[in-house]
Amino acid sequence: DEPFLITWNGIKQRRMSWQDGVLGTNCPIQPNSNWTYHFQLKDQIGTYTYFASTSMHRASGAFGGLNVYQRSVIFVPYPKPDSDFTLLVSDWYKMGQKEIRKRLDSGSNLPLPDGLLINA
């Protein structure tokens, strides 16, 4: 029920720089609507993150990892790892993002988190 916007952290937005997810460059996705992000990951090997960049949506879990593996035609100058995994760590609050925002807007400090959220 709120506008929503995703920032693609570290992804080069080739020919689509206006889709980088920064408020002011991008318009938020309005409630009850859809949007498909189009971007090229060509030659961008690595692990990147994405997160909501409006309101307090990130506090509600709107973040994640994006792993981009090499294409067979791209030389990588180091040995292939045996395995890999993405680990995301965040504060966990039992109260919702709207309640957290209301507290902060009233001048109160951010409360201590209720726990730690670890996604692997």
Image: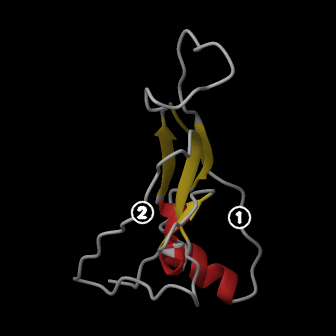
Amino acid type, label 1: Pro
From the image, which quarter does the N terminus lie in?
bottom left
From what the image shows, is residue 4 above or below residue 115?
Answer: below
Residue shown at the point (64%, 13%) measured from the top left: 79
* Front-most of residues 56 and 19: 19
Tell me residue 10's x, y (percent).
Answer: 63, 56
> Which tag is nearer the camera, tag 2 or tag 1?
2
Residue shown at the point (23%, 82%) measured from the top left: 33
Q: Pointer 2: residues within 10 angstroms few (<14), some, or many (20+)?
A: some
Which callout, 2 or 1, points at the residue further toward the start of the chain?
Answer: 2
Amino acid type, label 2: Phe
Residue 31 visible somewhere in the drawing: yes
Q: Residue furthest top?
A: 82
* Distance between the alpha carbons at the discs numbered 2 and 1: 37 Å
Q: Residue furthest front?
A: 73
The residue tagged 1 is: 111
The residue tagged 2 is: 39
Tell me residue 95's x, y (percent).
Answer: 50, 64
Residue shown at the point (48%, 73%) measured from the top left: 15
Residue 117 visible somewhere in the drawing: no
Q: Judging from the image, what secondary structure is the residue with disc 1 in?
A: loop
From what the image shows, is residue 62 above or below residue 24?
Answer: above
Q: Judging from the image, what secondary structure is the residue with disc 2 in?
A: loop
Tell me residue 69's x, y (percent).
Answer: 48, 33
Labelled pair 2, 1 in contact (Cβ < 8 Å): no
From what the image shows, is residue 55 above or below residue 48?
Answer: below
Residue shown at the point (48%, 39%) measured from the top left: 68
* Front-most of residues 105 and 78: 78
* Front-most of residues 67 and 73: 73
